[in-house]
Image: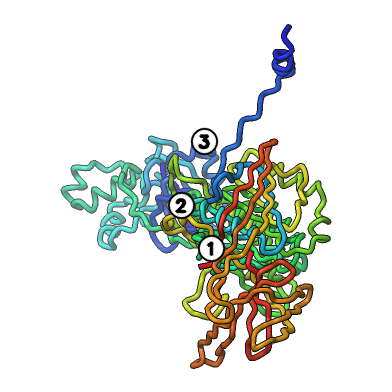
């Protein structure tokens, strides 16, 4: 018996079915698509372009008439920046958790359990690393289970990866350089930033570079 | 089949509990159609028993009669005490012993009949119609038909007042929310049943609690869409009362709902899913109980140049979406409240910034940009802004205002 047929015979004997590939939500950045029904982590240090990528995802989703939610642990969301990024604010539910990561976790859980959202973002971007690490793996597992078999994309935005194996996709953002224009002290302007987003999913890696424009 | 109530009390409300076709015959008599109730209660005797039982429960003192036509039922209810059920075809025999004055003929006609010795239904019913027509005219003929129990007519229906409210007066004051939930459930279920029987739903619940200290505590729940989901109503009311508890034990509850037509809409096959409105309202109420009342909603930009000016609007309807933007915009994360900073200047420009955990030498900067506004109001603002790159590797927006230097946020 050829060795290649053995796994298939075992799978049919045990009743295993290959898991279908999840539907993907475009992020607005080439090569990066987010799987629906999964937990995705966007991680990186301050000014690494994480929030720009997150707003781009929300803009894509609201343009598709999906309803989205931002659970803002540190009250850092800027509606003006979101509107400038193309997010339809009337389709966005903003939960301000007032510097309380536990509240953010509970609110995200309730929103996912309630269903009907296209994208739910849990923004722990400014939450201290120690606090974010204190979120137990059980809580992440619970969130992953809640979002499974739903068309929602659950995004956790943080400084470092916290969900470990519960995350189906981890996007690591890093700013390669900031674009300034004009002479220093006279007409200097912050034009934008170039961001490298390294995404790793099912042993497939890509690291596209995108430019987040300020002007 | 028709039933008649004759007595004292709120007869019309009692009749509407059994039938939508109700006639207010007189101040002390109400007639209503009970056809079809046999499938619910059984025999006419059982229907009459159910009406009499409900009358006792609601404090109505009335005699009940059931007959095949409204006038026979009215005569029986007015003529006999208690419960009367007239079998079909036996109306004349059943009503026979009743005095003719029950039919309220004109005094002249009554006097004529008395002179003839006709005093009871059975005597009037036995008279020949032709002779009555010749001597008493159409009025006499109508009186004979009524006395025989053969009159057939349609009810003159009254409109049911659309008033959906209920109240409970308590024997002992209730202090805790848990026992209150049972009372709320009872009221909500009752009102929802009354709405459902009229194919209506509600989008607003009003609760008024009379407290022991002689004050009242009022709460109003508004739903985004009309619904009849009693479990959701109860949970929403519980969450609302947990956030806004009454100041004293309560002694009386009053609840009313706003009756509206239920919303019927079919989702399109290719329309993206949105949260179910009532379920979302419940989810939002739960989240509000965690994070606070005014911290959940849809962000709405204000028509002003004041930095970071927005308000949280209630979650509502969605307009058509704008066209998709293809470029990624550099976003800013706002520090709320802004971080007070110590800024060292060199040649009038920021050189070193310290603000809490943020600390570093300014490597690049752009600015200052001077903005101001609302100087014509009591709350003016003015500031000089810089975009800076610090040696800690991050990009920040800092500003200098009348109160000093602040870090407003970081570009991310």
Q: Give the vertical position of B390 relative to B78 (above or below).
A: below
Instruction: Answer left or right for B314 relative to B262.
Output: right
CA separation in Å, label 3 and label 2: 35 Å
Q: How many marks?
A: 3
Q: Give the vertical position of B244 relative to A202 (above or below).
A: below
Name the mark nearer the viewer: 3 or 1.
Answer: 1
Q: Give the vertical position of B74 relative to B211 (above or below).
A: above
CA separation in Å, label 1 and label 2: 48 Å
Q: Secondary structure at mark 2?
A: loop
Which subunit holds the residue at mark 1?
Answer: A
Which subunit holds the residue at mark 2?
Answer: B
Q: Which residue is mark 2?
A: B262
- Which dot marks residue B43? 3
Residue at left 62%, top 56%? A195
Residue at left 77%, top 51%? A162
- In this rendering, do the residues under marks 3 and 1 share a single chain? no
């Amino acid at each position: 018996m050829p060795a290649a047929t053995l796994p298939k015979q075992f799978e049919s004997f045990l009743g295993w079915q290959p898991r279908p590939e999840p539907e993907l939500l475009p992020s607005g950045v080439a090569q990066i698509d987010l799987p629906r029904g999964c937990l995705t982590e966007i991680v990186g240090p301050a000014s690494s372009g994480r929030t720009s990528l997150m707003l781009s995802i929300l803009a894509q989703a609201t343009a598709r008439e999906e309803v989205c939610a931002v659970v803002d642990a540190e009250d850092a969301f800027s509606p003006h920046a979101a509107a400038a990024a193309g997010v339809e604010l009337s389709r966005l539910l903003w939960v301000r958790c007032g510097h309380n990561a536990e509240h953010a976790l509970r609110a995200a859980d309730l929103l996912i359990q309630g269903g009907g959202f296209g994208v739910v973002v849990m923004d722990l971007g400014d939450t201290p690393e120690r606090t974010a690490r204190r979120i137990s793996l059980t809580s992440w597992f619970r969130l992953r289970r809640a979002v499974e078999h739903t068309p929602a994309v659950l995004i956790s935005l943080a400084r470092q990866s916290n969900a470990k194996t519960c995350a189906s996709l981890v996007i690591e953002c890093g700013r390669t350089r900031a674009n300034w224009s004009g002479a220093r002290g006279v007409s200097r302007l912050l034009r934008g930033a170039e961001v490298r987003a390294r995404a790793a999913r099912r042993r497939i890696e890509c690291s596209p570079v995108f430019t987040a424009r300020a002007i | 089949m028709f039933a008649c109530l004759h007595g004292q009390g709120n007869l019309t409300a009692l009749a509407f509990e059994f039938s939508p076709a109700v006639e207010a015959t007189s101040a002390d008599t109400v007639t209503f159609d009970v056809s079809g109730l046999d499938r619910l209660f059984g025999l006419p005797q059982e229907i009459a028993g159910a009406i009499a039982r409900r009358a006792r429960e609601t404090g109505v003192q009335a005699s009940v009669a059931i007959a095949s036509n409204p006038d026979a039922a009215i005569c029986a209810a007015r003529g006999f005490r208690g419960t009367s059920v007239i079998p079909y075809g036996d109306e004349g025999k059943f009503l026979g012993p009743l005095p003719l004055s029950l039919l309220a003929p004109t005094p002249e006609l009554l006097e004529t009949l008395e002179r003839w010795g006709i005093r009871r239904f059975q005597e009037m019913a036995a008279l020949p119609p032709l002779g009555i027509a010749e001597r008493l005219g159409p009025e006499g003929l109508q009186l004979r038909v009524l006395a025989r129990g053969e009159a057939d007519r349609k009810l003159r229906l009254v409109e049911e007042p659309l008033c959906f409210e209920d109240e409970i007066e308590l024997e002992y004051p209730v202090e805790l929310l848990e026992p209150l939930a049972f009372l709320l459930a009872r009221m909500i279920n009752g009102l929802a049943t009354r709405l459902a029987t009229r194919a209506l739903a509600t989008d607003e619940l009003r609760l008024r609690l009379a407290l022991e200290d002689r004050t009242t505590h009022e709460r109003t729940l508004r739903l985004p869409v009309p619904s009849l989901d009693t479990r959701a109503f109860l949970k929403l009311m519980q969450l609302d009362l947990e956030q806004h508890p009454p100041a004293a034990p309560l002694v009386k509850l009053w609840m009313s709902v706003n009756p509206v037509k239920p919303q019927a809409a079919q989702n399109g096959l290719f329309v993206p899913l949105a949260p179910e409105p009532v379920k979302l309202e419940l989810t939002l109420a739960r989240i509000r109980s965690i994070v606070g009342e005014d911290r959940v909603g849809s962000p709405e930009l204000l028509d002003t140049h004041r930095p970071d000016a927005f308000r949280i609007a209630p979650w509502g309807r969605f307009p058509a979406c704008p066209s998709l933007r293809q470029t990624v915009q550099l976003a800013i994360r706002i520090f709320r409240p802004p971080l007070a900073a110590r800024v060292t200047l060199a040649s009038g420009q920021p050189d070193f910034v310290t603000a809490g955990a943020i600390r570093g030498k300014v490597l690049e900067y752009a600015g200052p940009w001077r903005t101001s506004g609302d100087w014509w109001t009591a709350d003016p603002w003015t500031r000089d802004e810089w975009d800076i790159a610090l040696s800690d590797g991050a990009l920040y927006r800092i500003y200098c205002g009348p109160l000093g230097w602040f870090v407003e946020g970081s570009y991310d």
